[in-house]
Amino acid sequence: MKKHHVLGLLVCLMSMQVWAQPIQMLLPKVSEFRMDTAPAGFDLRILHLESGDAFSKSGFLNATKVKHAKQFGVATRQTSGMRQKITAQDPLVHDDFGMKRVFAVNGMQVPLPGGTPNDNTIAISNDSILLAGVNSFIWGWDLKQDTFLFAQQFISLIQAYGLPTNSYASDPRLHYDPVEDRFVLLFFVGNNPQTSQVFVCFSETNDPRDGWHGYSIPGNPLNNNRWSDFPAITVTEDKLILSINLIIPGVSWQVGFDGSIIWEMDKHAGYAGDSLPVELHHGITYGGEWIRNLHAITGWNGSTTVPMFMSNRNFSAQNDSVFFLRRNDSAVGGTHSYDIHLIHASEAYGLPPNGVQPSTPTGQLNKGMQTNDARWLGGMEMPDGSVHVVSTTREFSSQRSAIYHGILHNPLSPDTLYGHVIGDNIKYFGYPNLAFIGNEECDGEVLIGFNHTSPVDYPGFSALYYGNDGTYSNVISLKSGLGNVNKLGGAERWGDYFGIQSVYNDPQQAWLAGFYGLANGSNSTWFSLLESPDSTRLDLQVDMTGVGCEVEVSAIAIGGVPPYNYAWDSNPGIALAGPYCSGDSVSLSVTDARGCQQALSVYVPYADVTTPSVFPNPTQDMVLMACDAPSGGEVSITLTTLNGQVITVGKRPVKAGRNEAQLWLGHLPAGTYHVRIHFGDQTGSSQTSHLLSEKLLLIPSP
């Protein structure tokens, strides 16, 4: 049965749930730094090999996985995990390269080893700047120049921010905001209540070398002996949103979980470097119990319409319960409330077994590649408002770790999460993330990237494409591992997340940042650029015939999927409309069988006015010039200022009779110009030229 619970500032009388009063703060900027001038130094730190996050205490998790293996069994070579419907074409691979360093002394290039866990995160700007983060440094690449972004090649988060050298940074998250053309960086420092801080940094410009504004958020915000762990990040039109877990120190991470919290902050204040209004939402429970591991939903185009979060029963052996939270309003500092929905998943998920690499001892369930739990690891709002989520799950027929892909079709009235399990008959999959990869807003295309390993495959990563028809492509391997990962005594850290982002100014492409094993037992990051295989983009052109008030306009639909439906000034019609008069404007739209739409504003030009003519005059932008050519040939157009400066516009071929030239003049300074059109008649090897038109044109001041 579907249950809906609406929680706000007070206890909801219709349920037992409580959402505590939000806490508002104004945080000062505490740092301003430049990554490209971060001082060189030893950056000496003595660290435990494994990052001190909540997963470093995994006794309960290991015991639970052993228990579930006894319940469901373990994978064998005979069990199959191929469950997705494969009819979609494979995504196209356009580029790939590794995170590397180059030694100046001899030019040698080597992979740059990552952290434990690696925590891959990535952000790509519309100007082709790629930022990547791992535990615990930032690495940049200029995709246009094909070179390092920073002279230092990679920069410690501690060094960049200017923190004391005995601090430890972890859990980096990067985000590119295409609306504001800025980057956001988040990372943690400290793993106990006394040292825990969340550092949030906003780039000053669209170039991450130009400087950053830094803010510090308390990691123990309720002063109740907790520390912050496992962030997720998203943006809306006016906010930066973080979801974070609070952990009780000194106990296992399952026992020590003490609720997920939500931070909301004014992103425009952060980009400007002003004091930062923030709001803390806490006390998020259902049935008197914490909702675990809230995961912030991102947007297909870089931002979501409203803050949204997903959660599940991440330790359960087998479950179909999903929590969906959606903000009722969006104003910072106003009245706040969220809707909390407990919904049903059509396909069960469960705590995944660890992945097996070639060196994993047979039957040792606590070895191999650590898959952690079944929490959501990626979520995205699509152009149609639906929400897609992905996680690692147990595949219940093969008993391997696999990918769970869920779709919530109507977040405004959520009911069922439609689930699909993506598995393999040999490989173990883990740590998925996803990105929109459609070439039109009407598309529902998704790219899912994830790590892979098997008894015969070193740890690497793969991807698959989800098409408009609801089918999947083959799983394609993007990077094969070079060796077993061998850092820890138990299960090797395999996550904790996967980097992926659409190229927002070319959304049919996406960059992925995945995990792969090195030959020396370490791990690194590999980048791949993939493109949608869909080429059915709908386009629209027009053709006109007639003169005066007898002009007919023909719509020409290109691509898409027929049949096409046309509308002229919002009225249904056919591909041909008219008659129209010169100077008329008409809006045209075409919709194809998929529901995809393209629209044009059509202007009927003045092709029958007395020539020569210039219209409109005065003008600040577009101008139309009509002239009569005595025969086929070529016209050249020049503009001359009153002080004699000649500006050559260009040459174009013309046919005999009436011709119209259209120019954009919005970039020229205000003033009076002589517009001259010369006509050249090409005859054999010689050409005669004479003045066809001369007019005065005024460009007024704005």
Image (tube, rainbow, N blue to C red):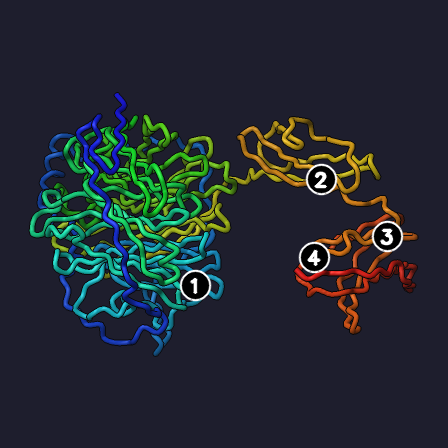
Is residue 66 shown to the viewer in this render?
yes
C-alpha span from label 3 to label 2: 22 Å
Q: Are marks 3 and 2 in contact (CB under 8 Å)?
A: no
Q: Give the labeled residue for mark 1.
A: 205
Residue 480 seen by the camera:
no
Look at the numbered discs 3 and 4 and tell me whether their residues touch, using CB distance below 8 Å. no
Regarding mark 2 in the picture, which secondary structure is present there?
strand
Residue 194 in the image, given as x and y percentages of width and height: 12, 59
Mark positioned earlier in the residue sequence (3 or 2)? 2
In the image, which disc is placed on residue 627?
3
Foreground mark, 1 or 2, reads 2
Q: Crowding at label 2, few (<14), some or many (≥20) Cα neighbours within 10 Å? A: some
Q: Which circle marks residue 620 in the picture?
A: 4
Badge nearest the viewer, 4 or 1: 4
Nearer to us in this view, 390 or 603: 603
Q: Are marks 4 and 1 in contact (CB under 8 Å)?
A: no
Give the mark toward the camera: 4 or 2: 4
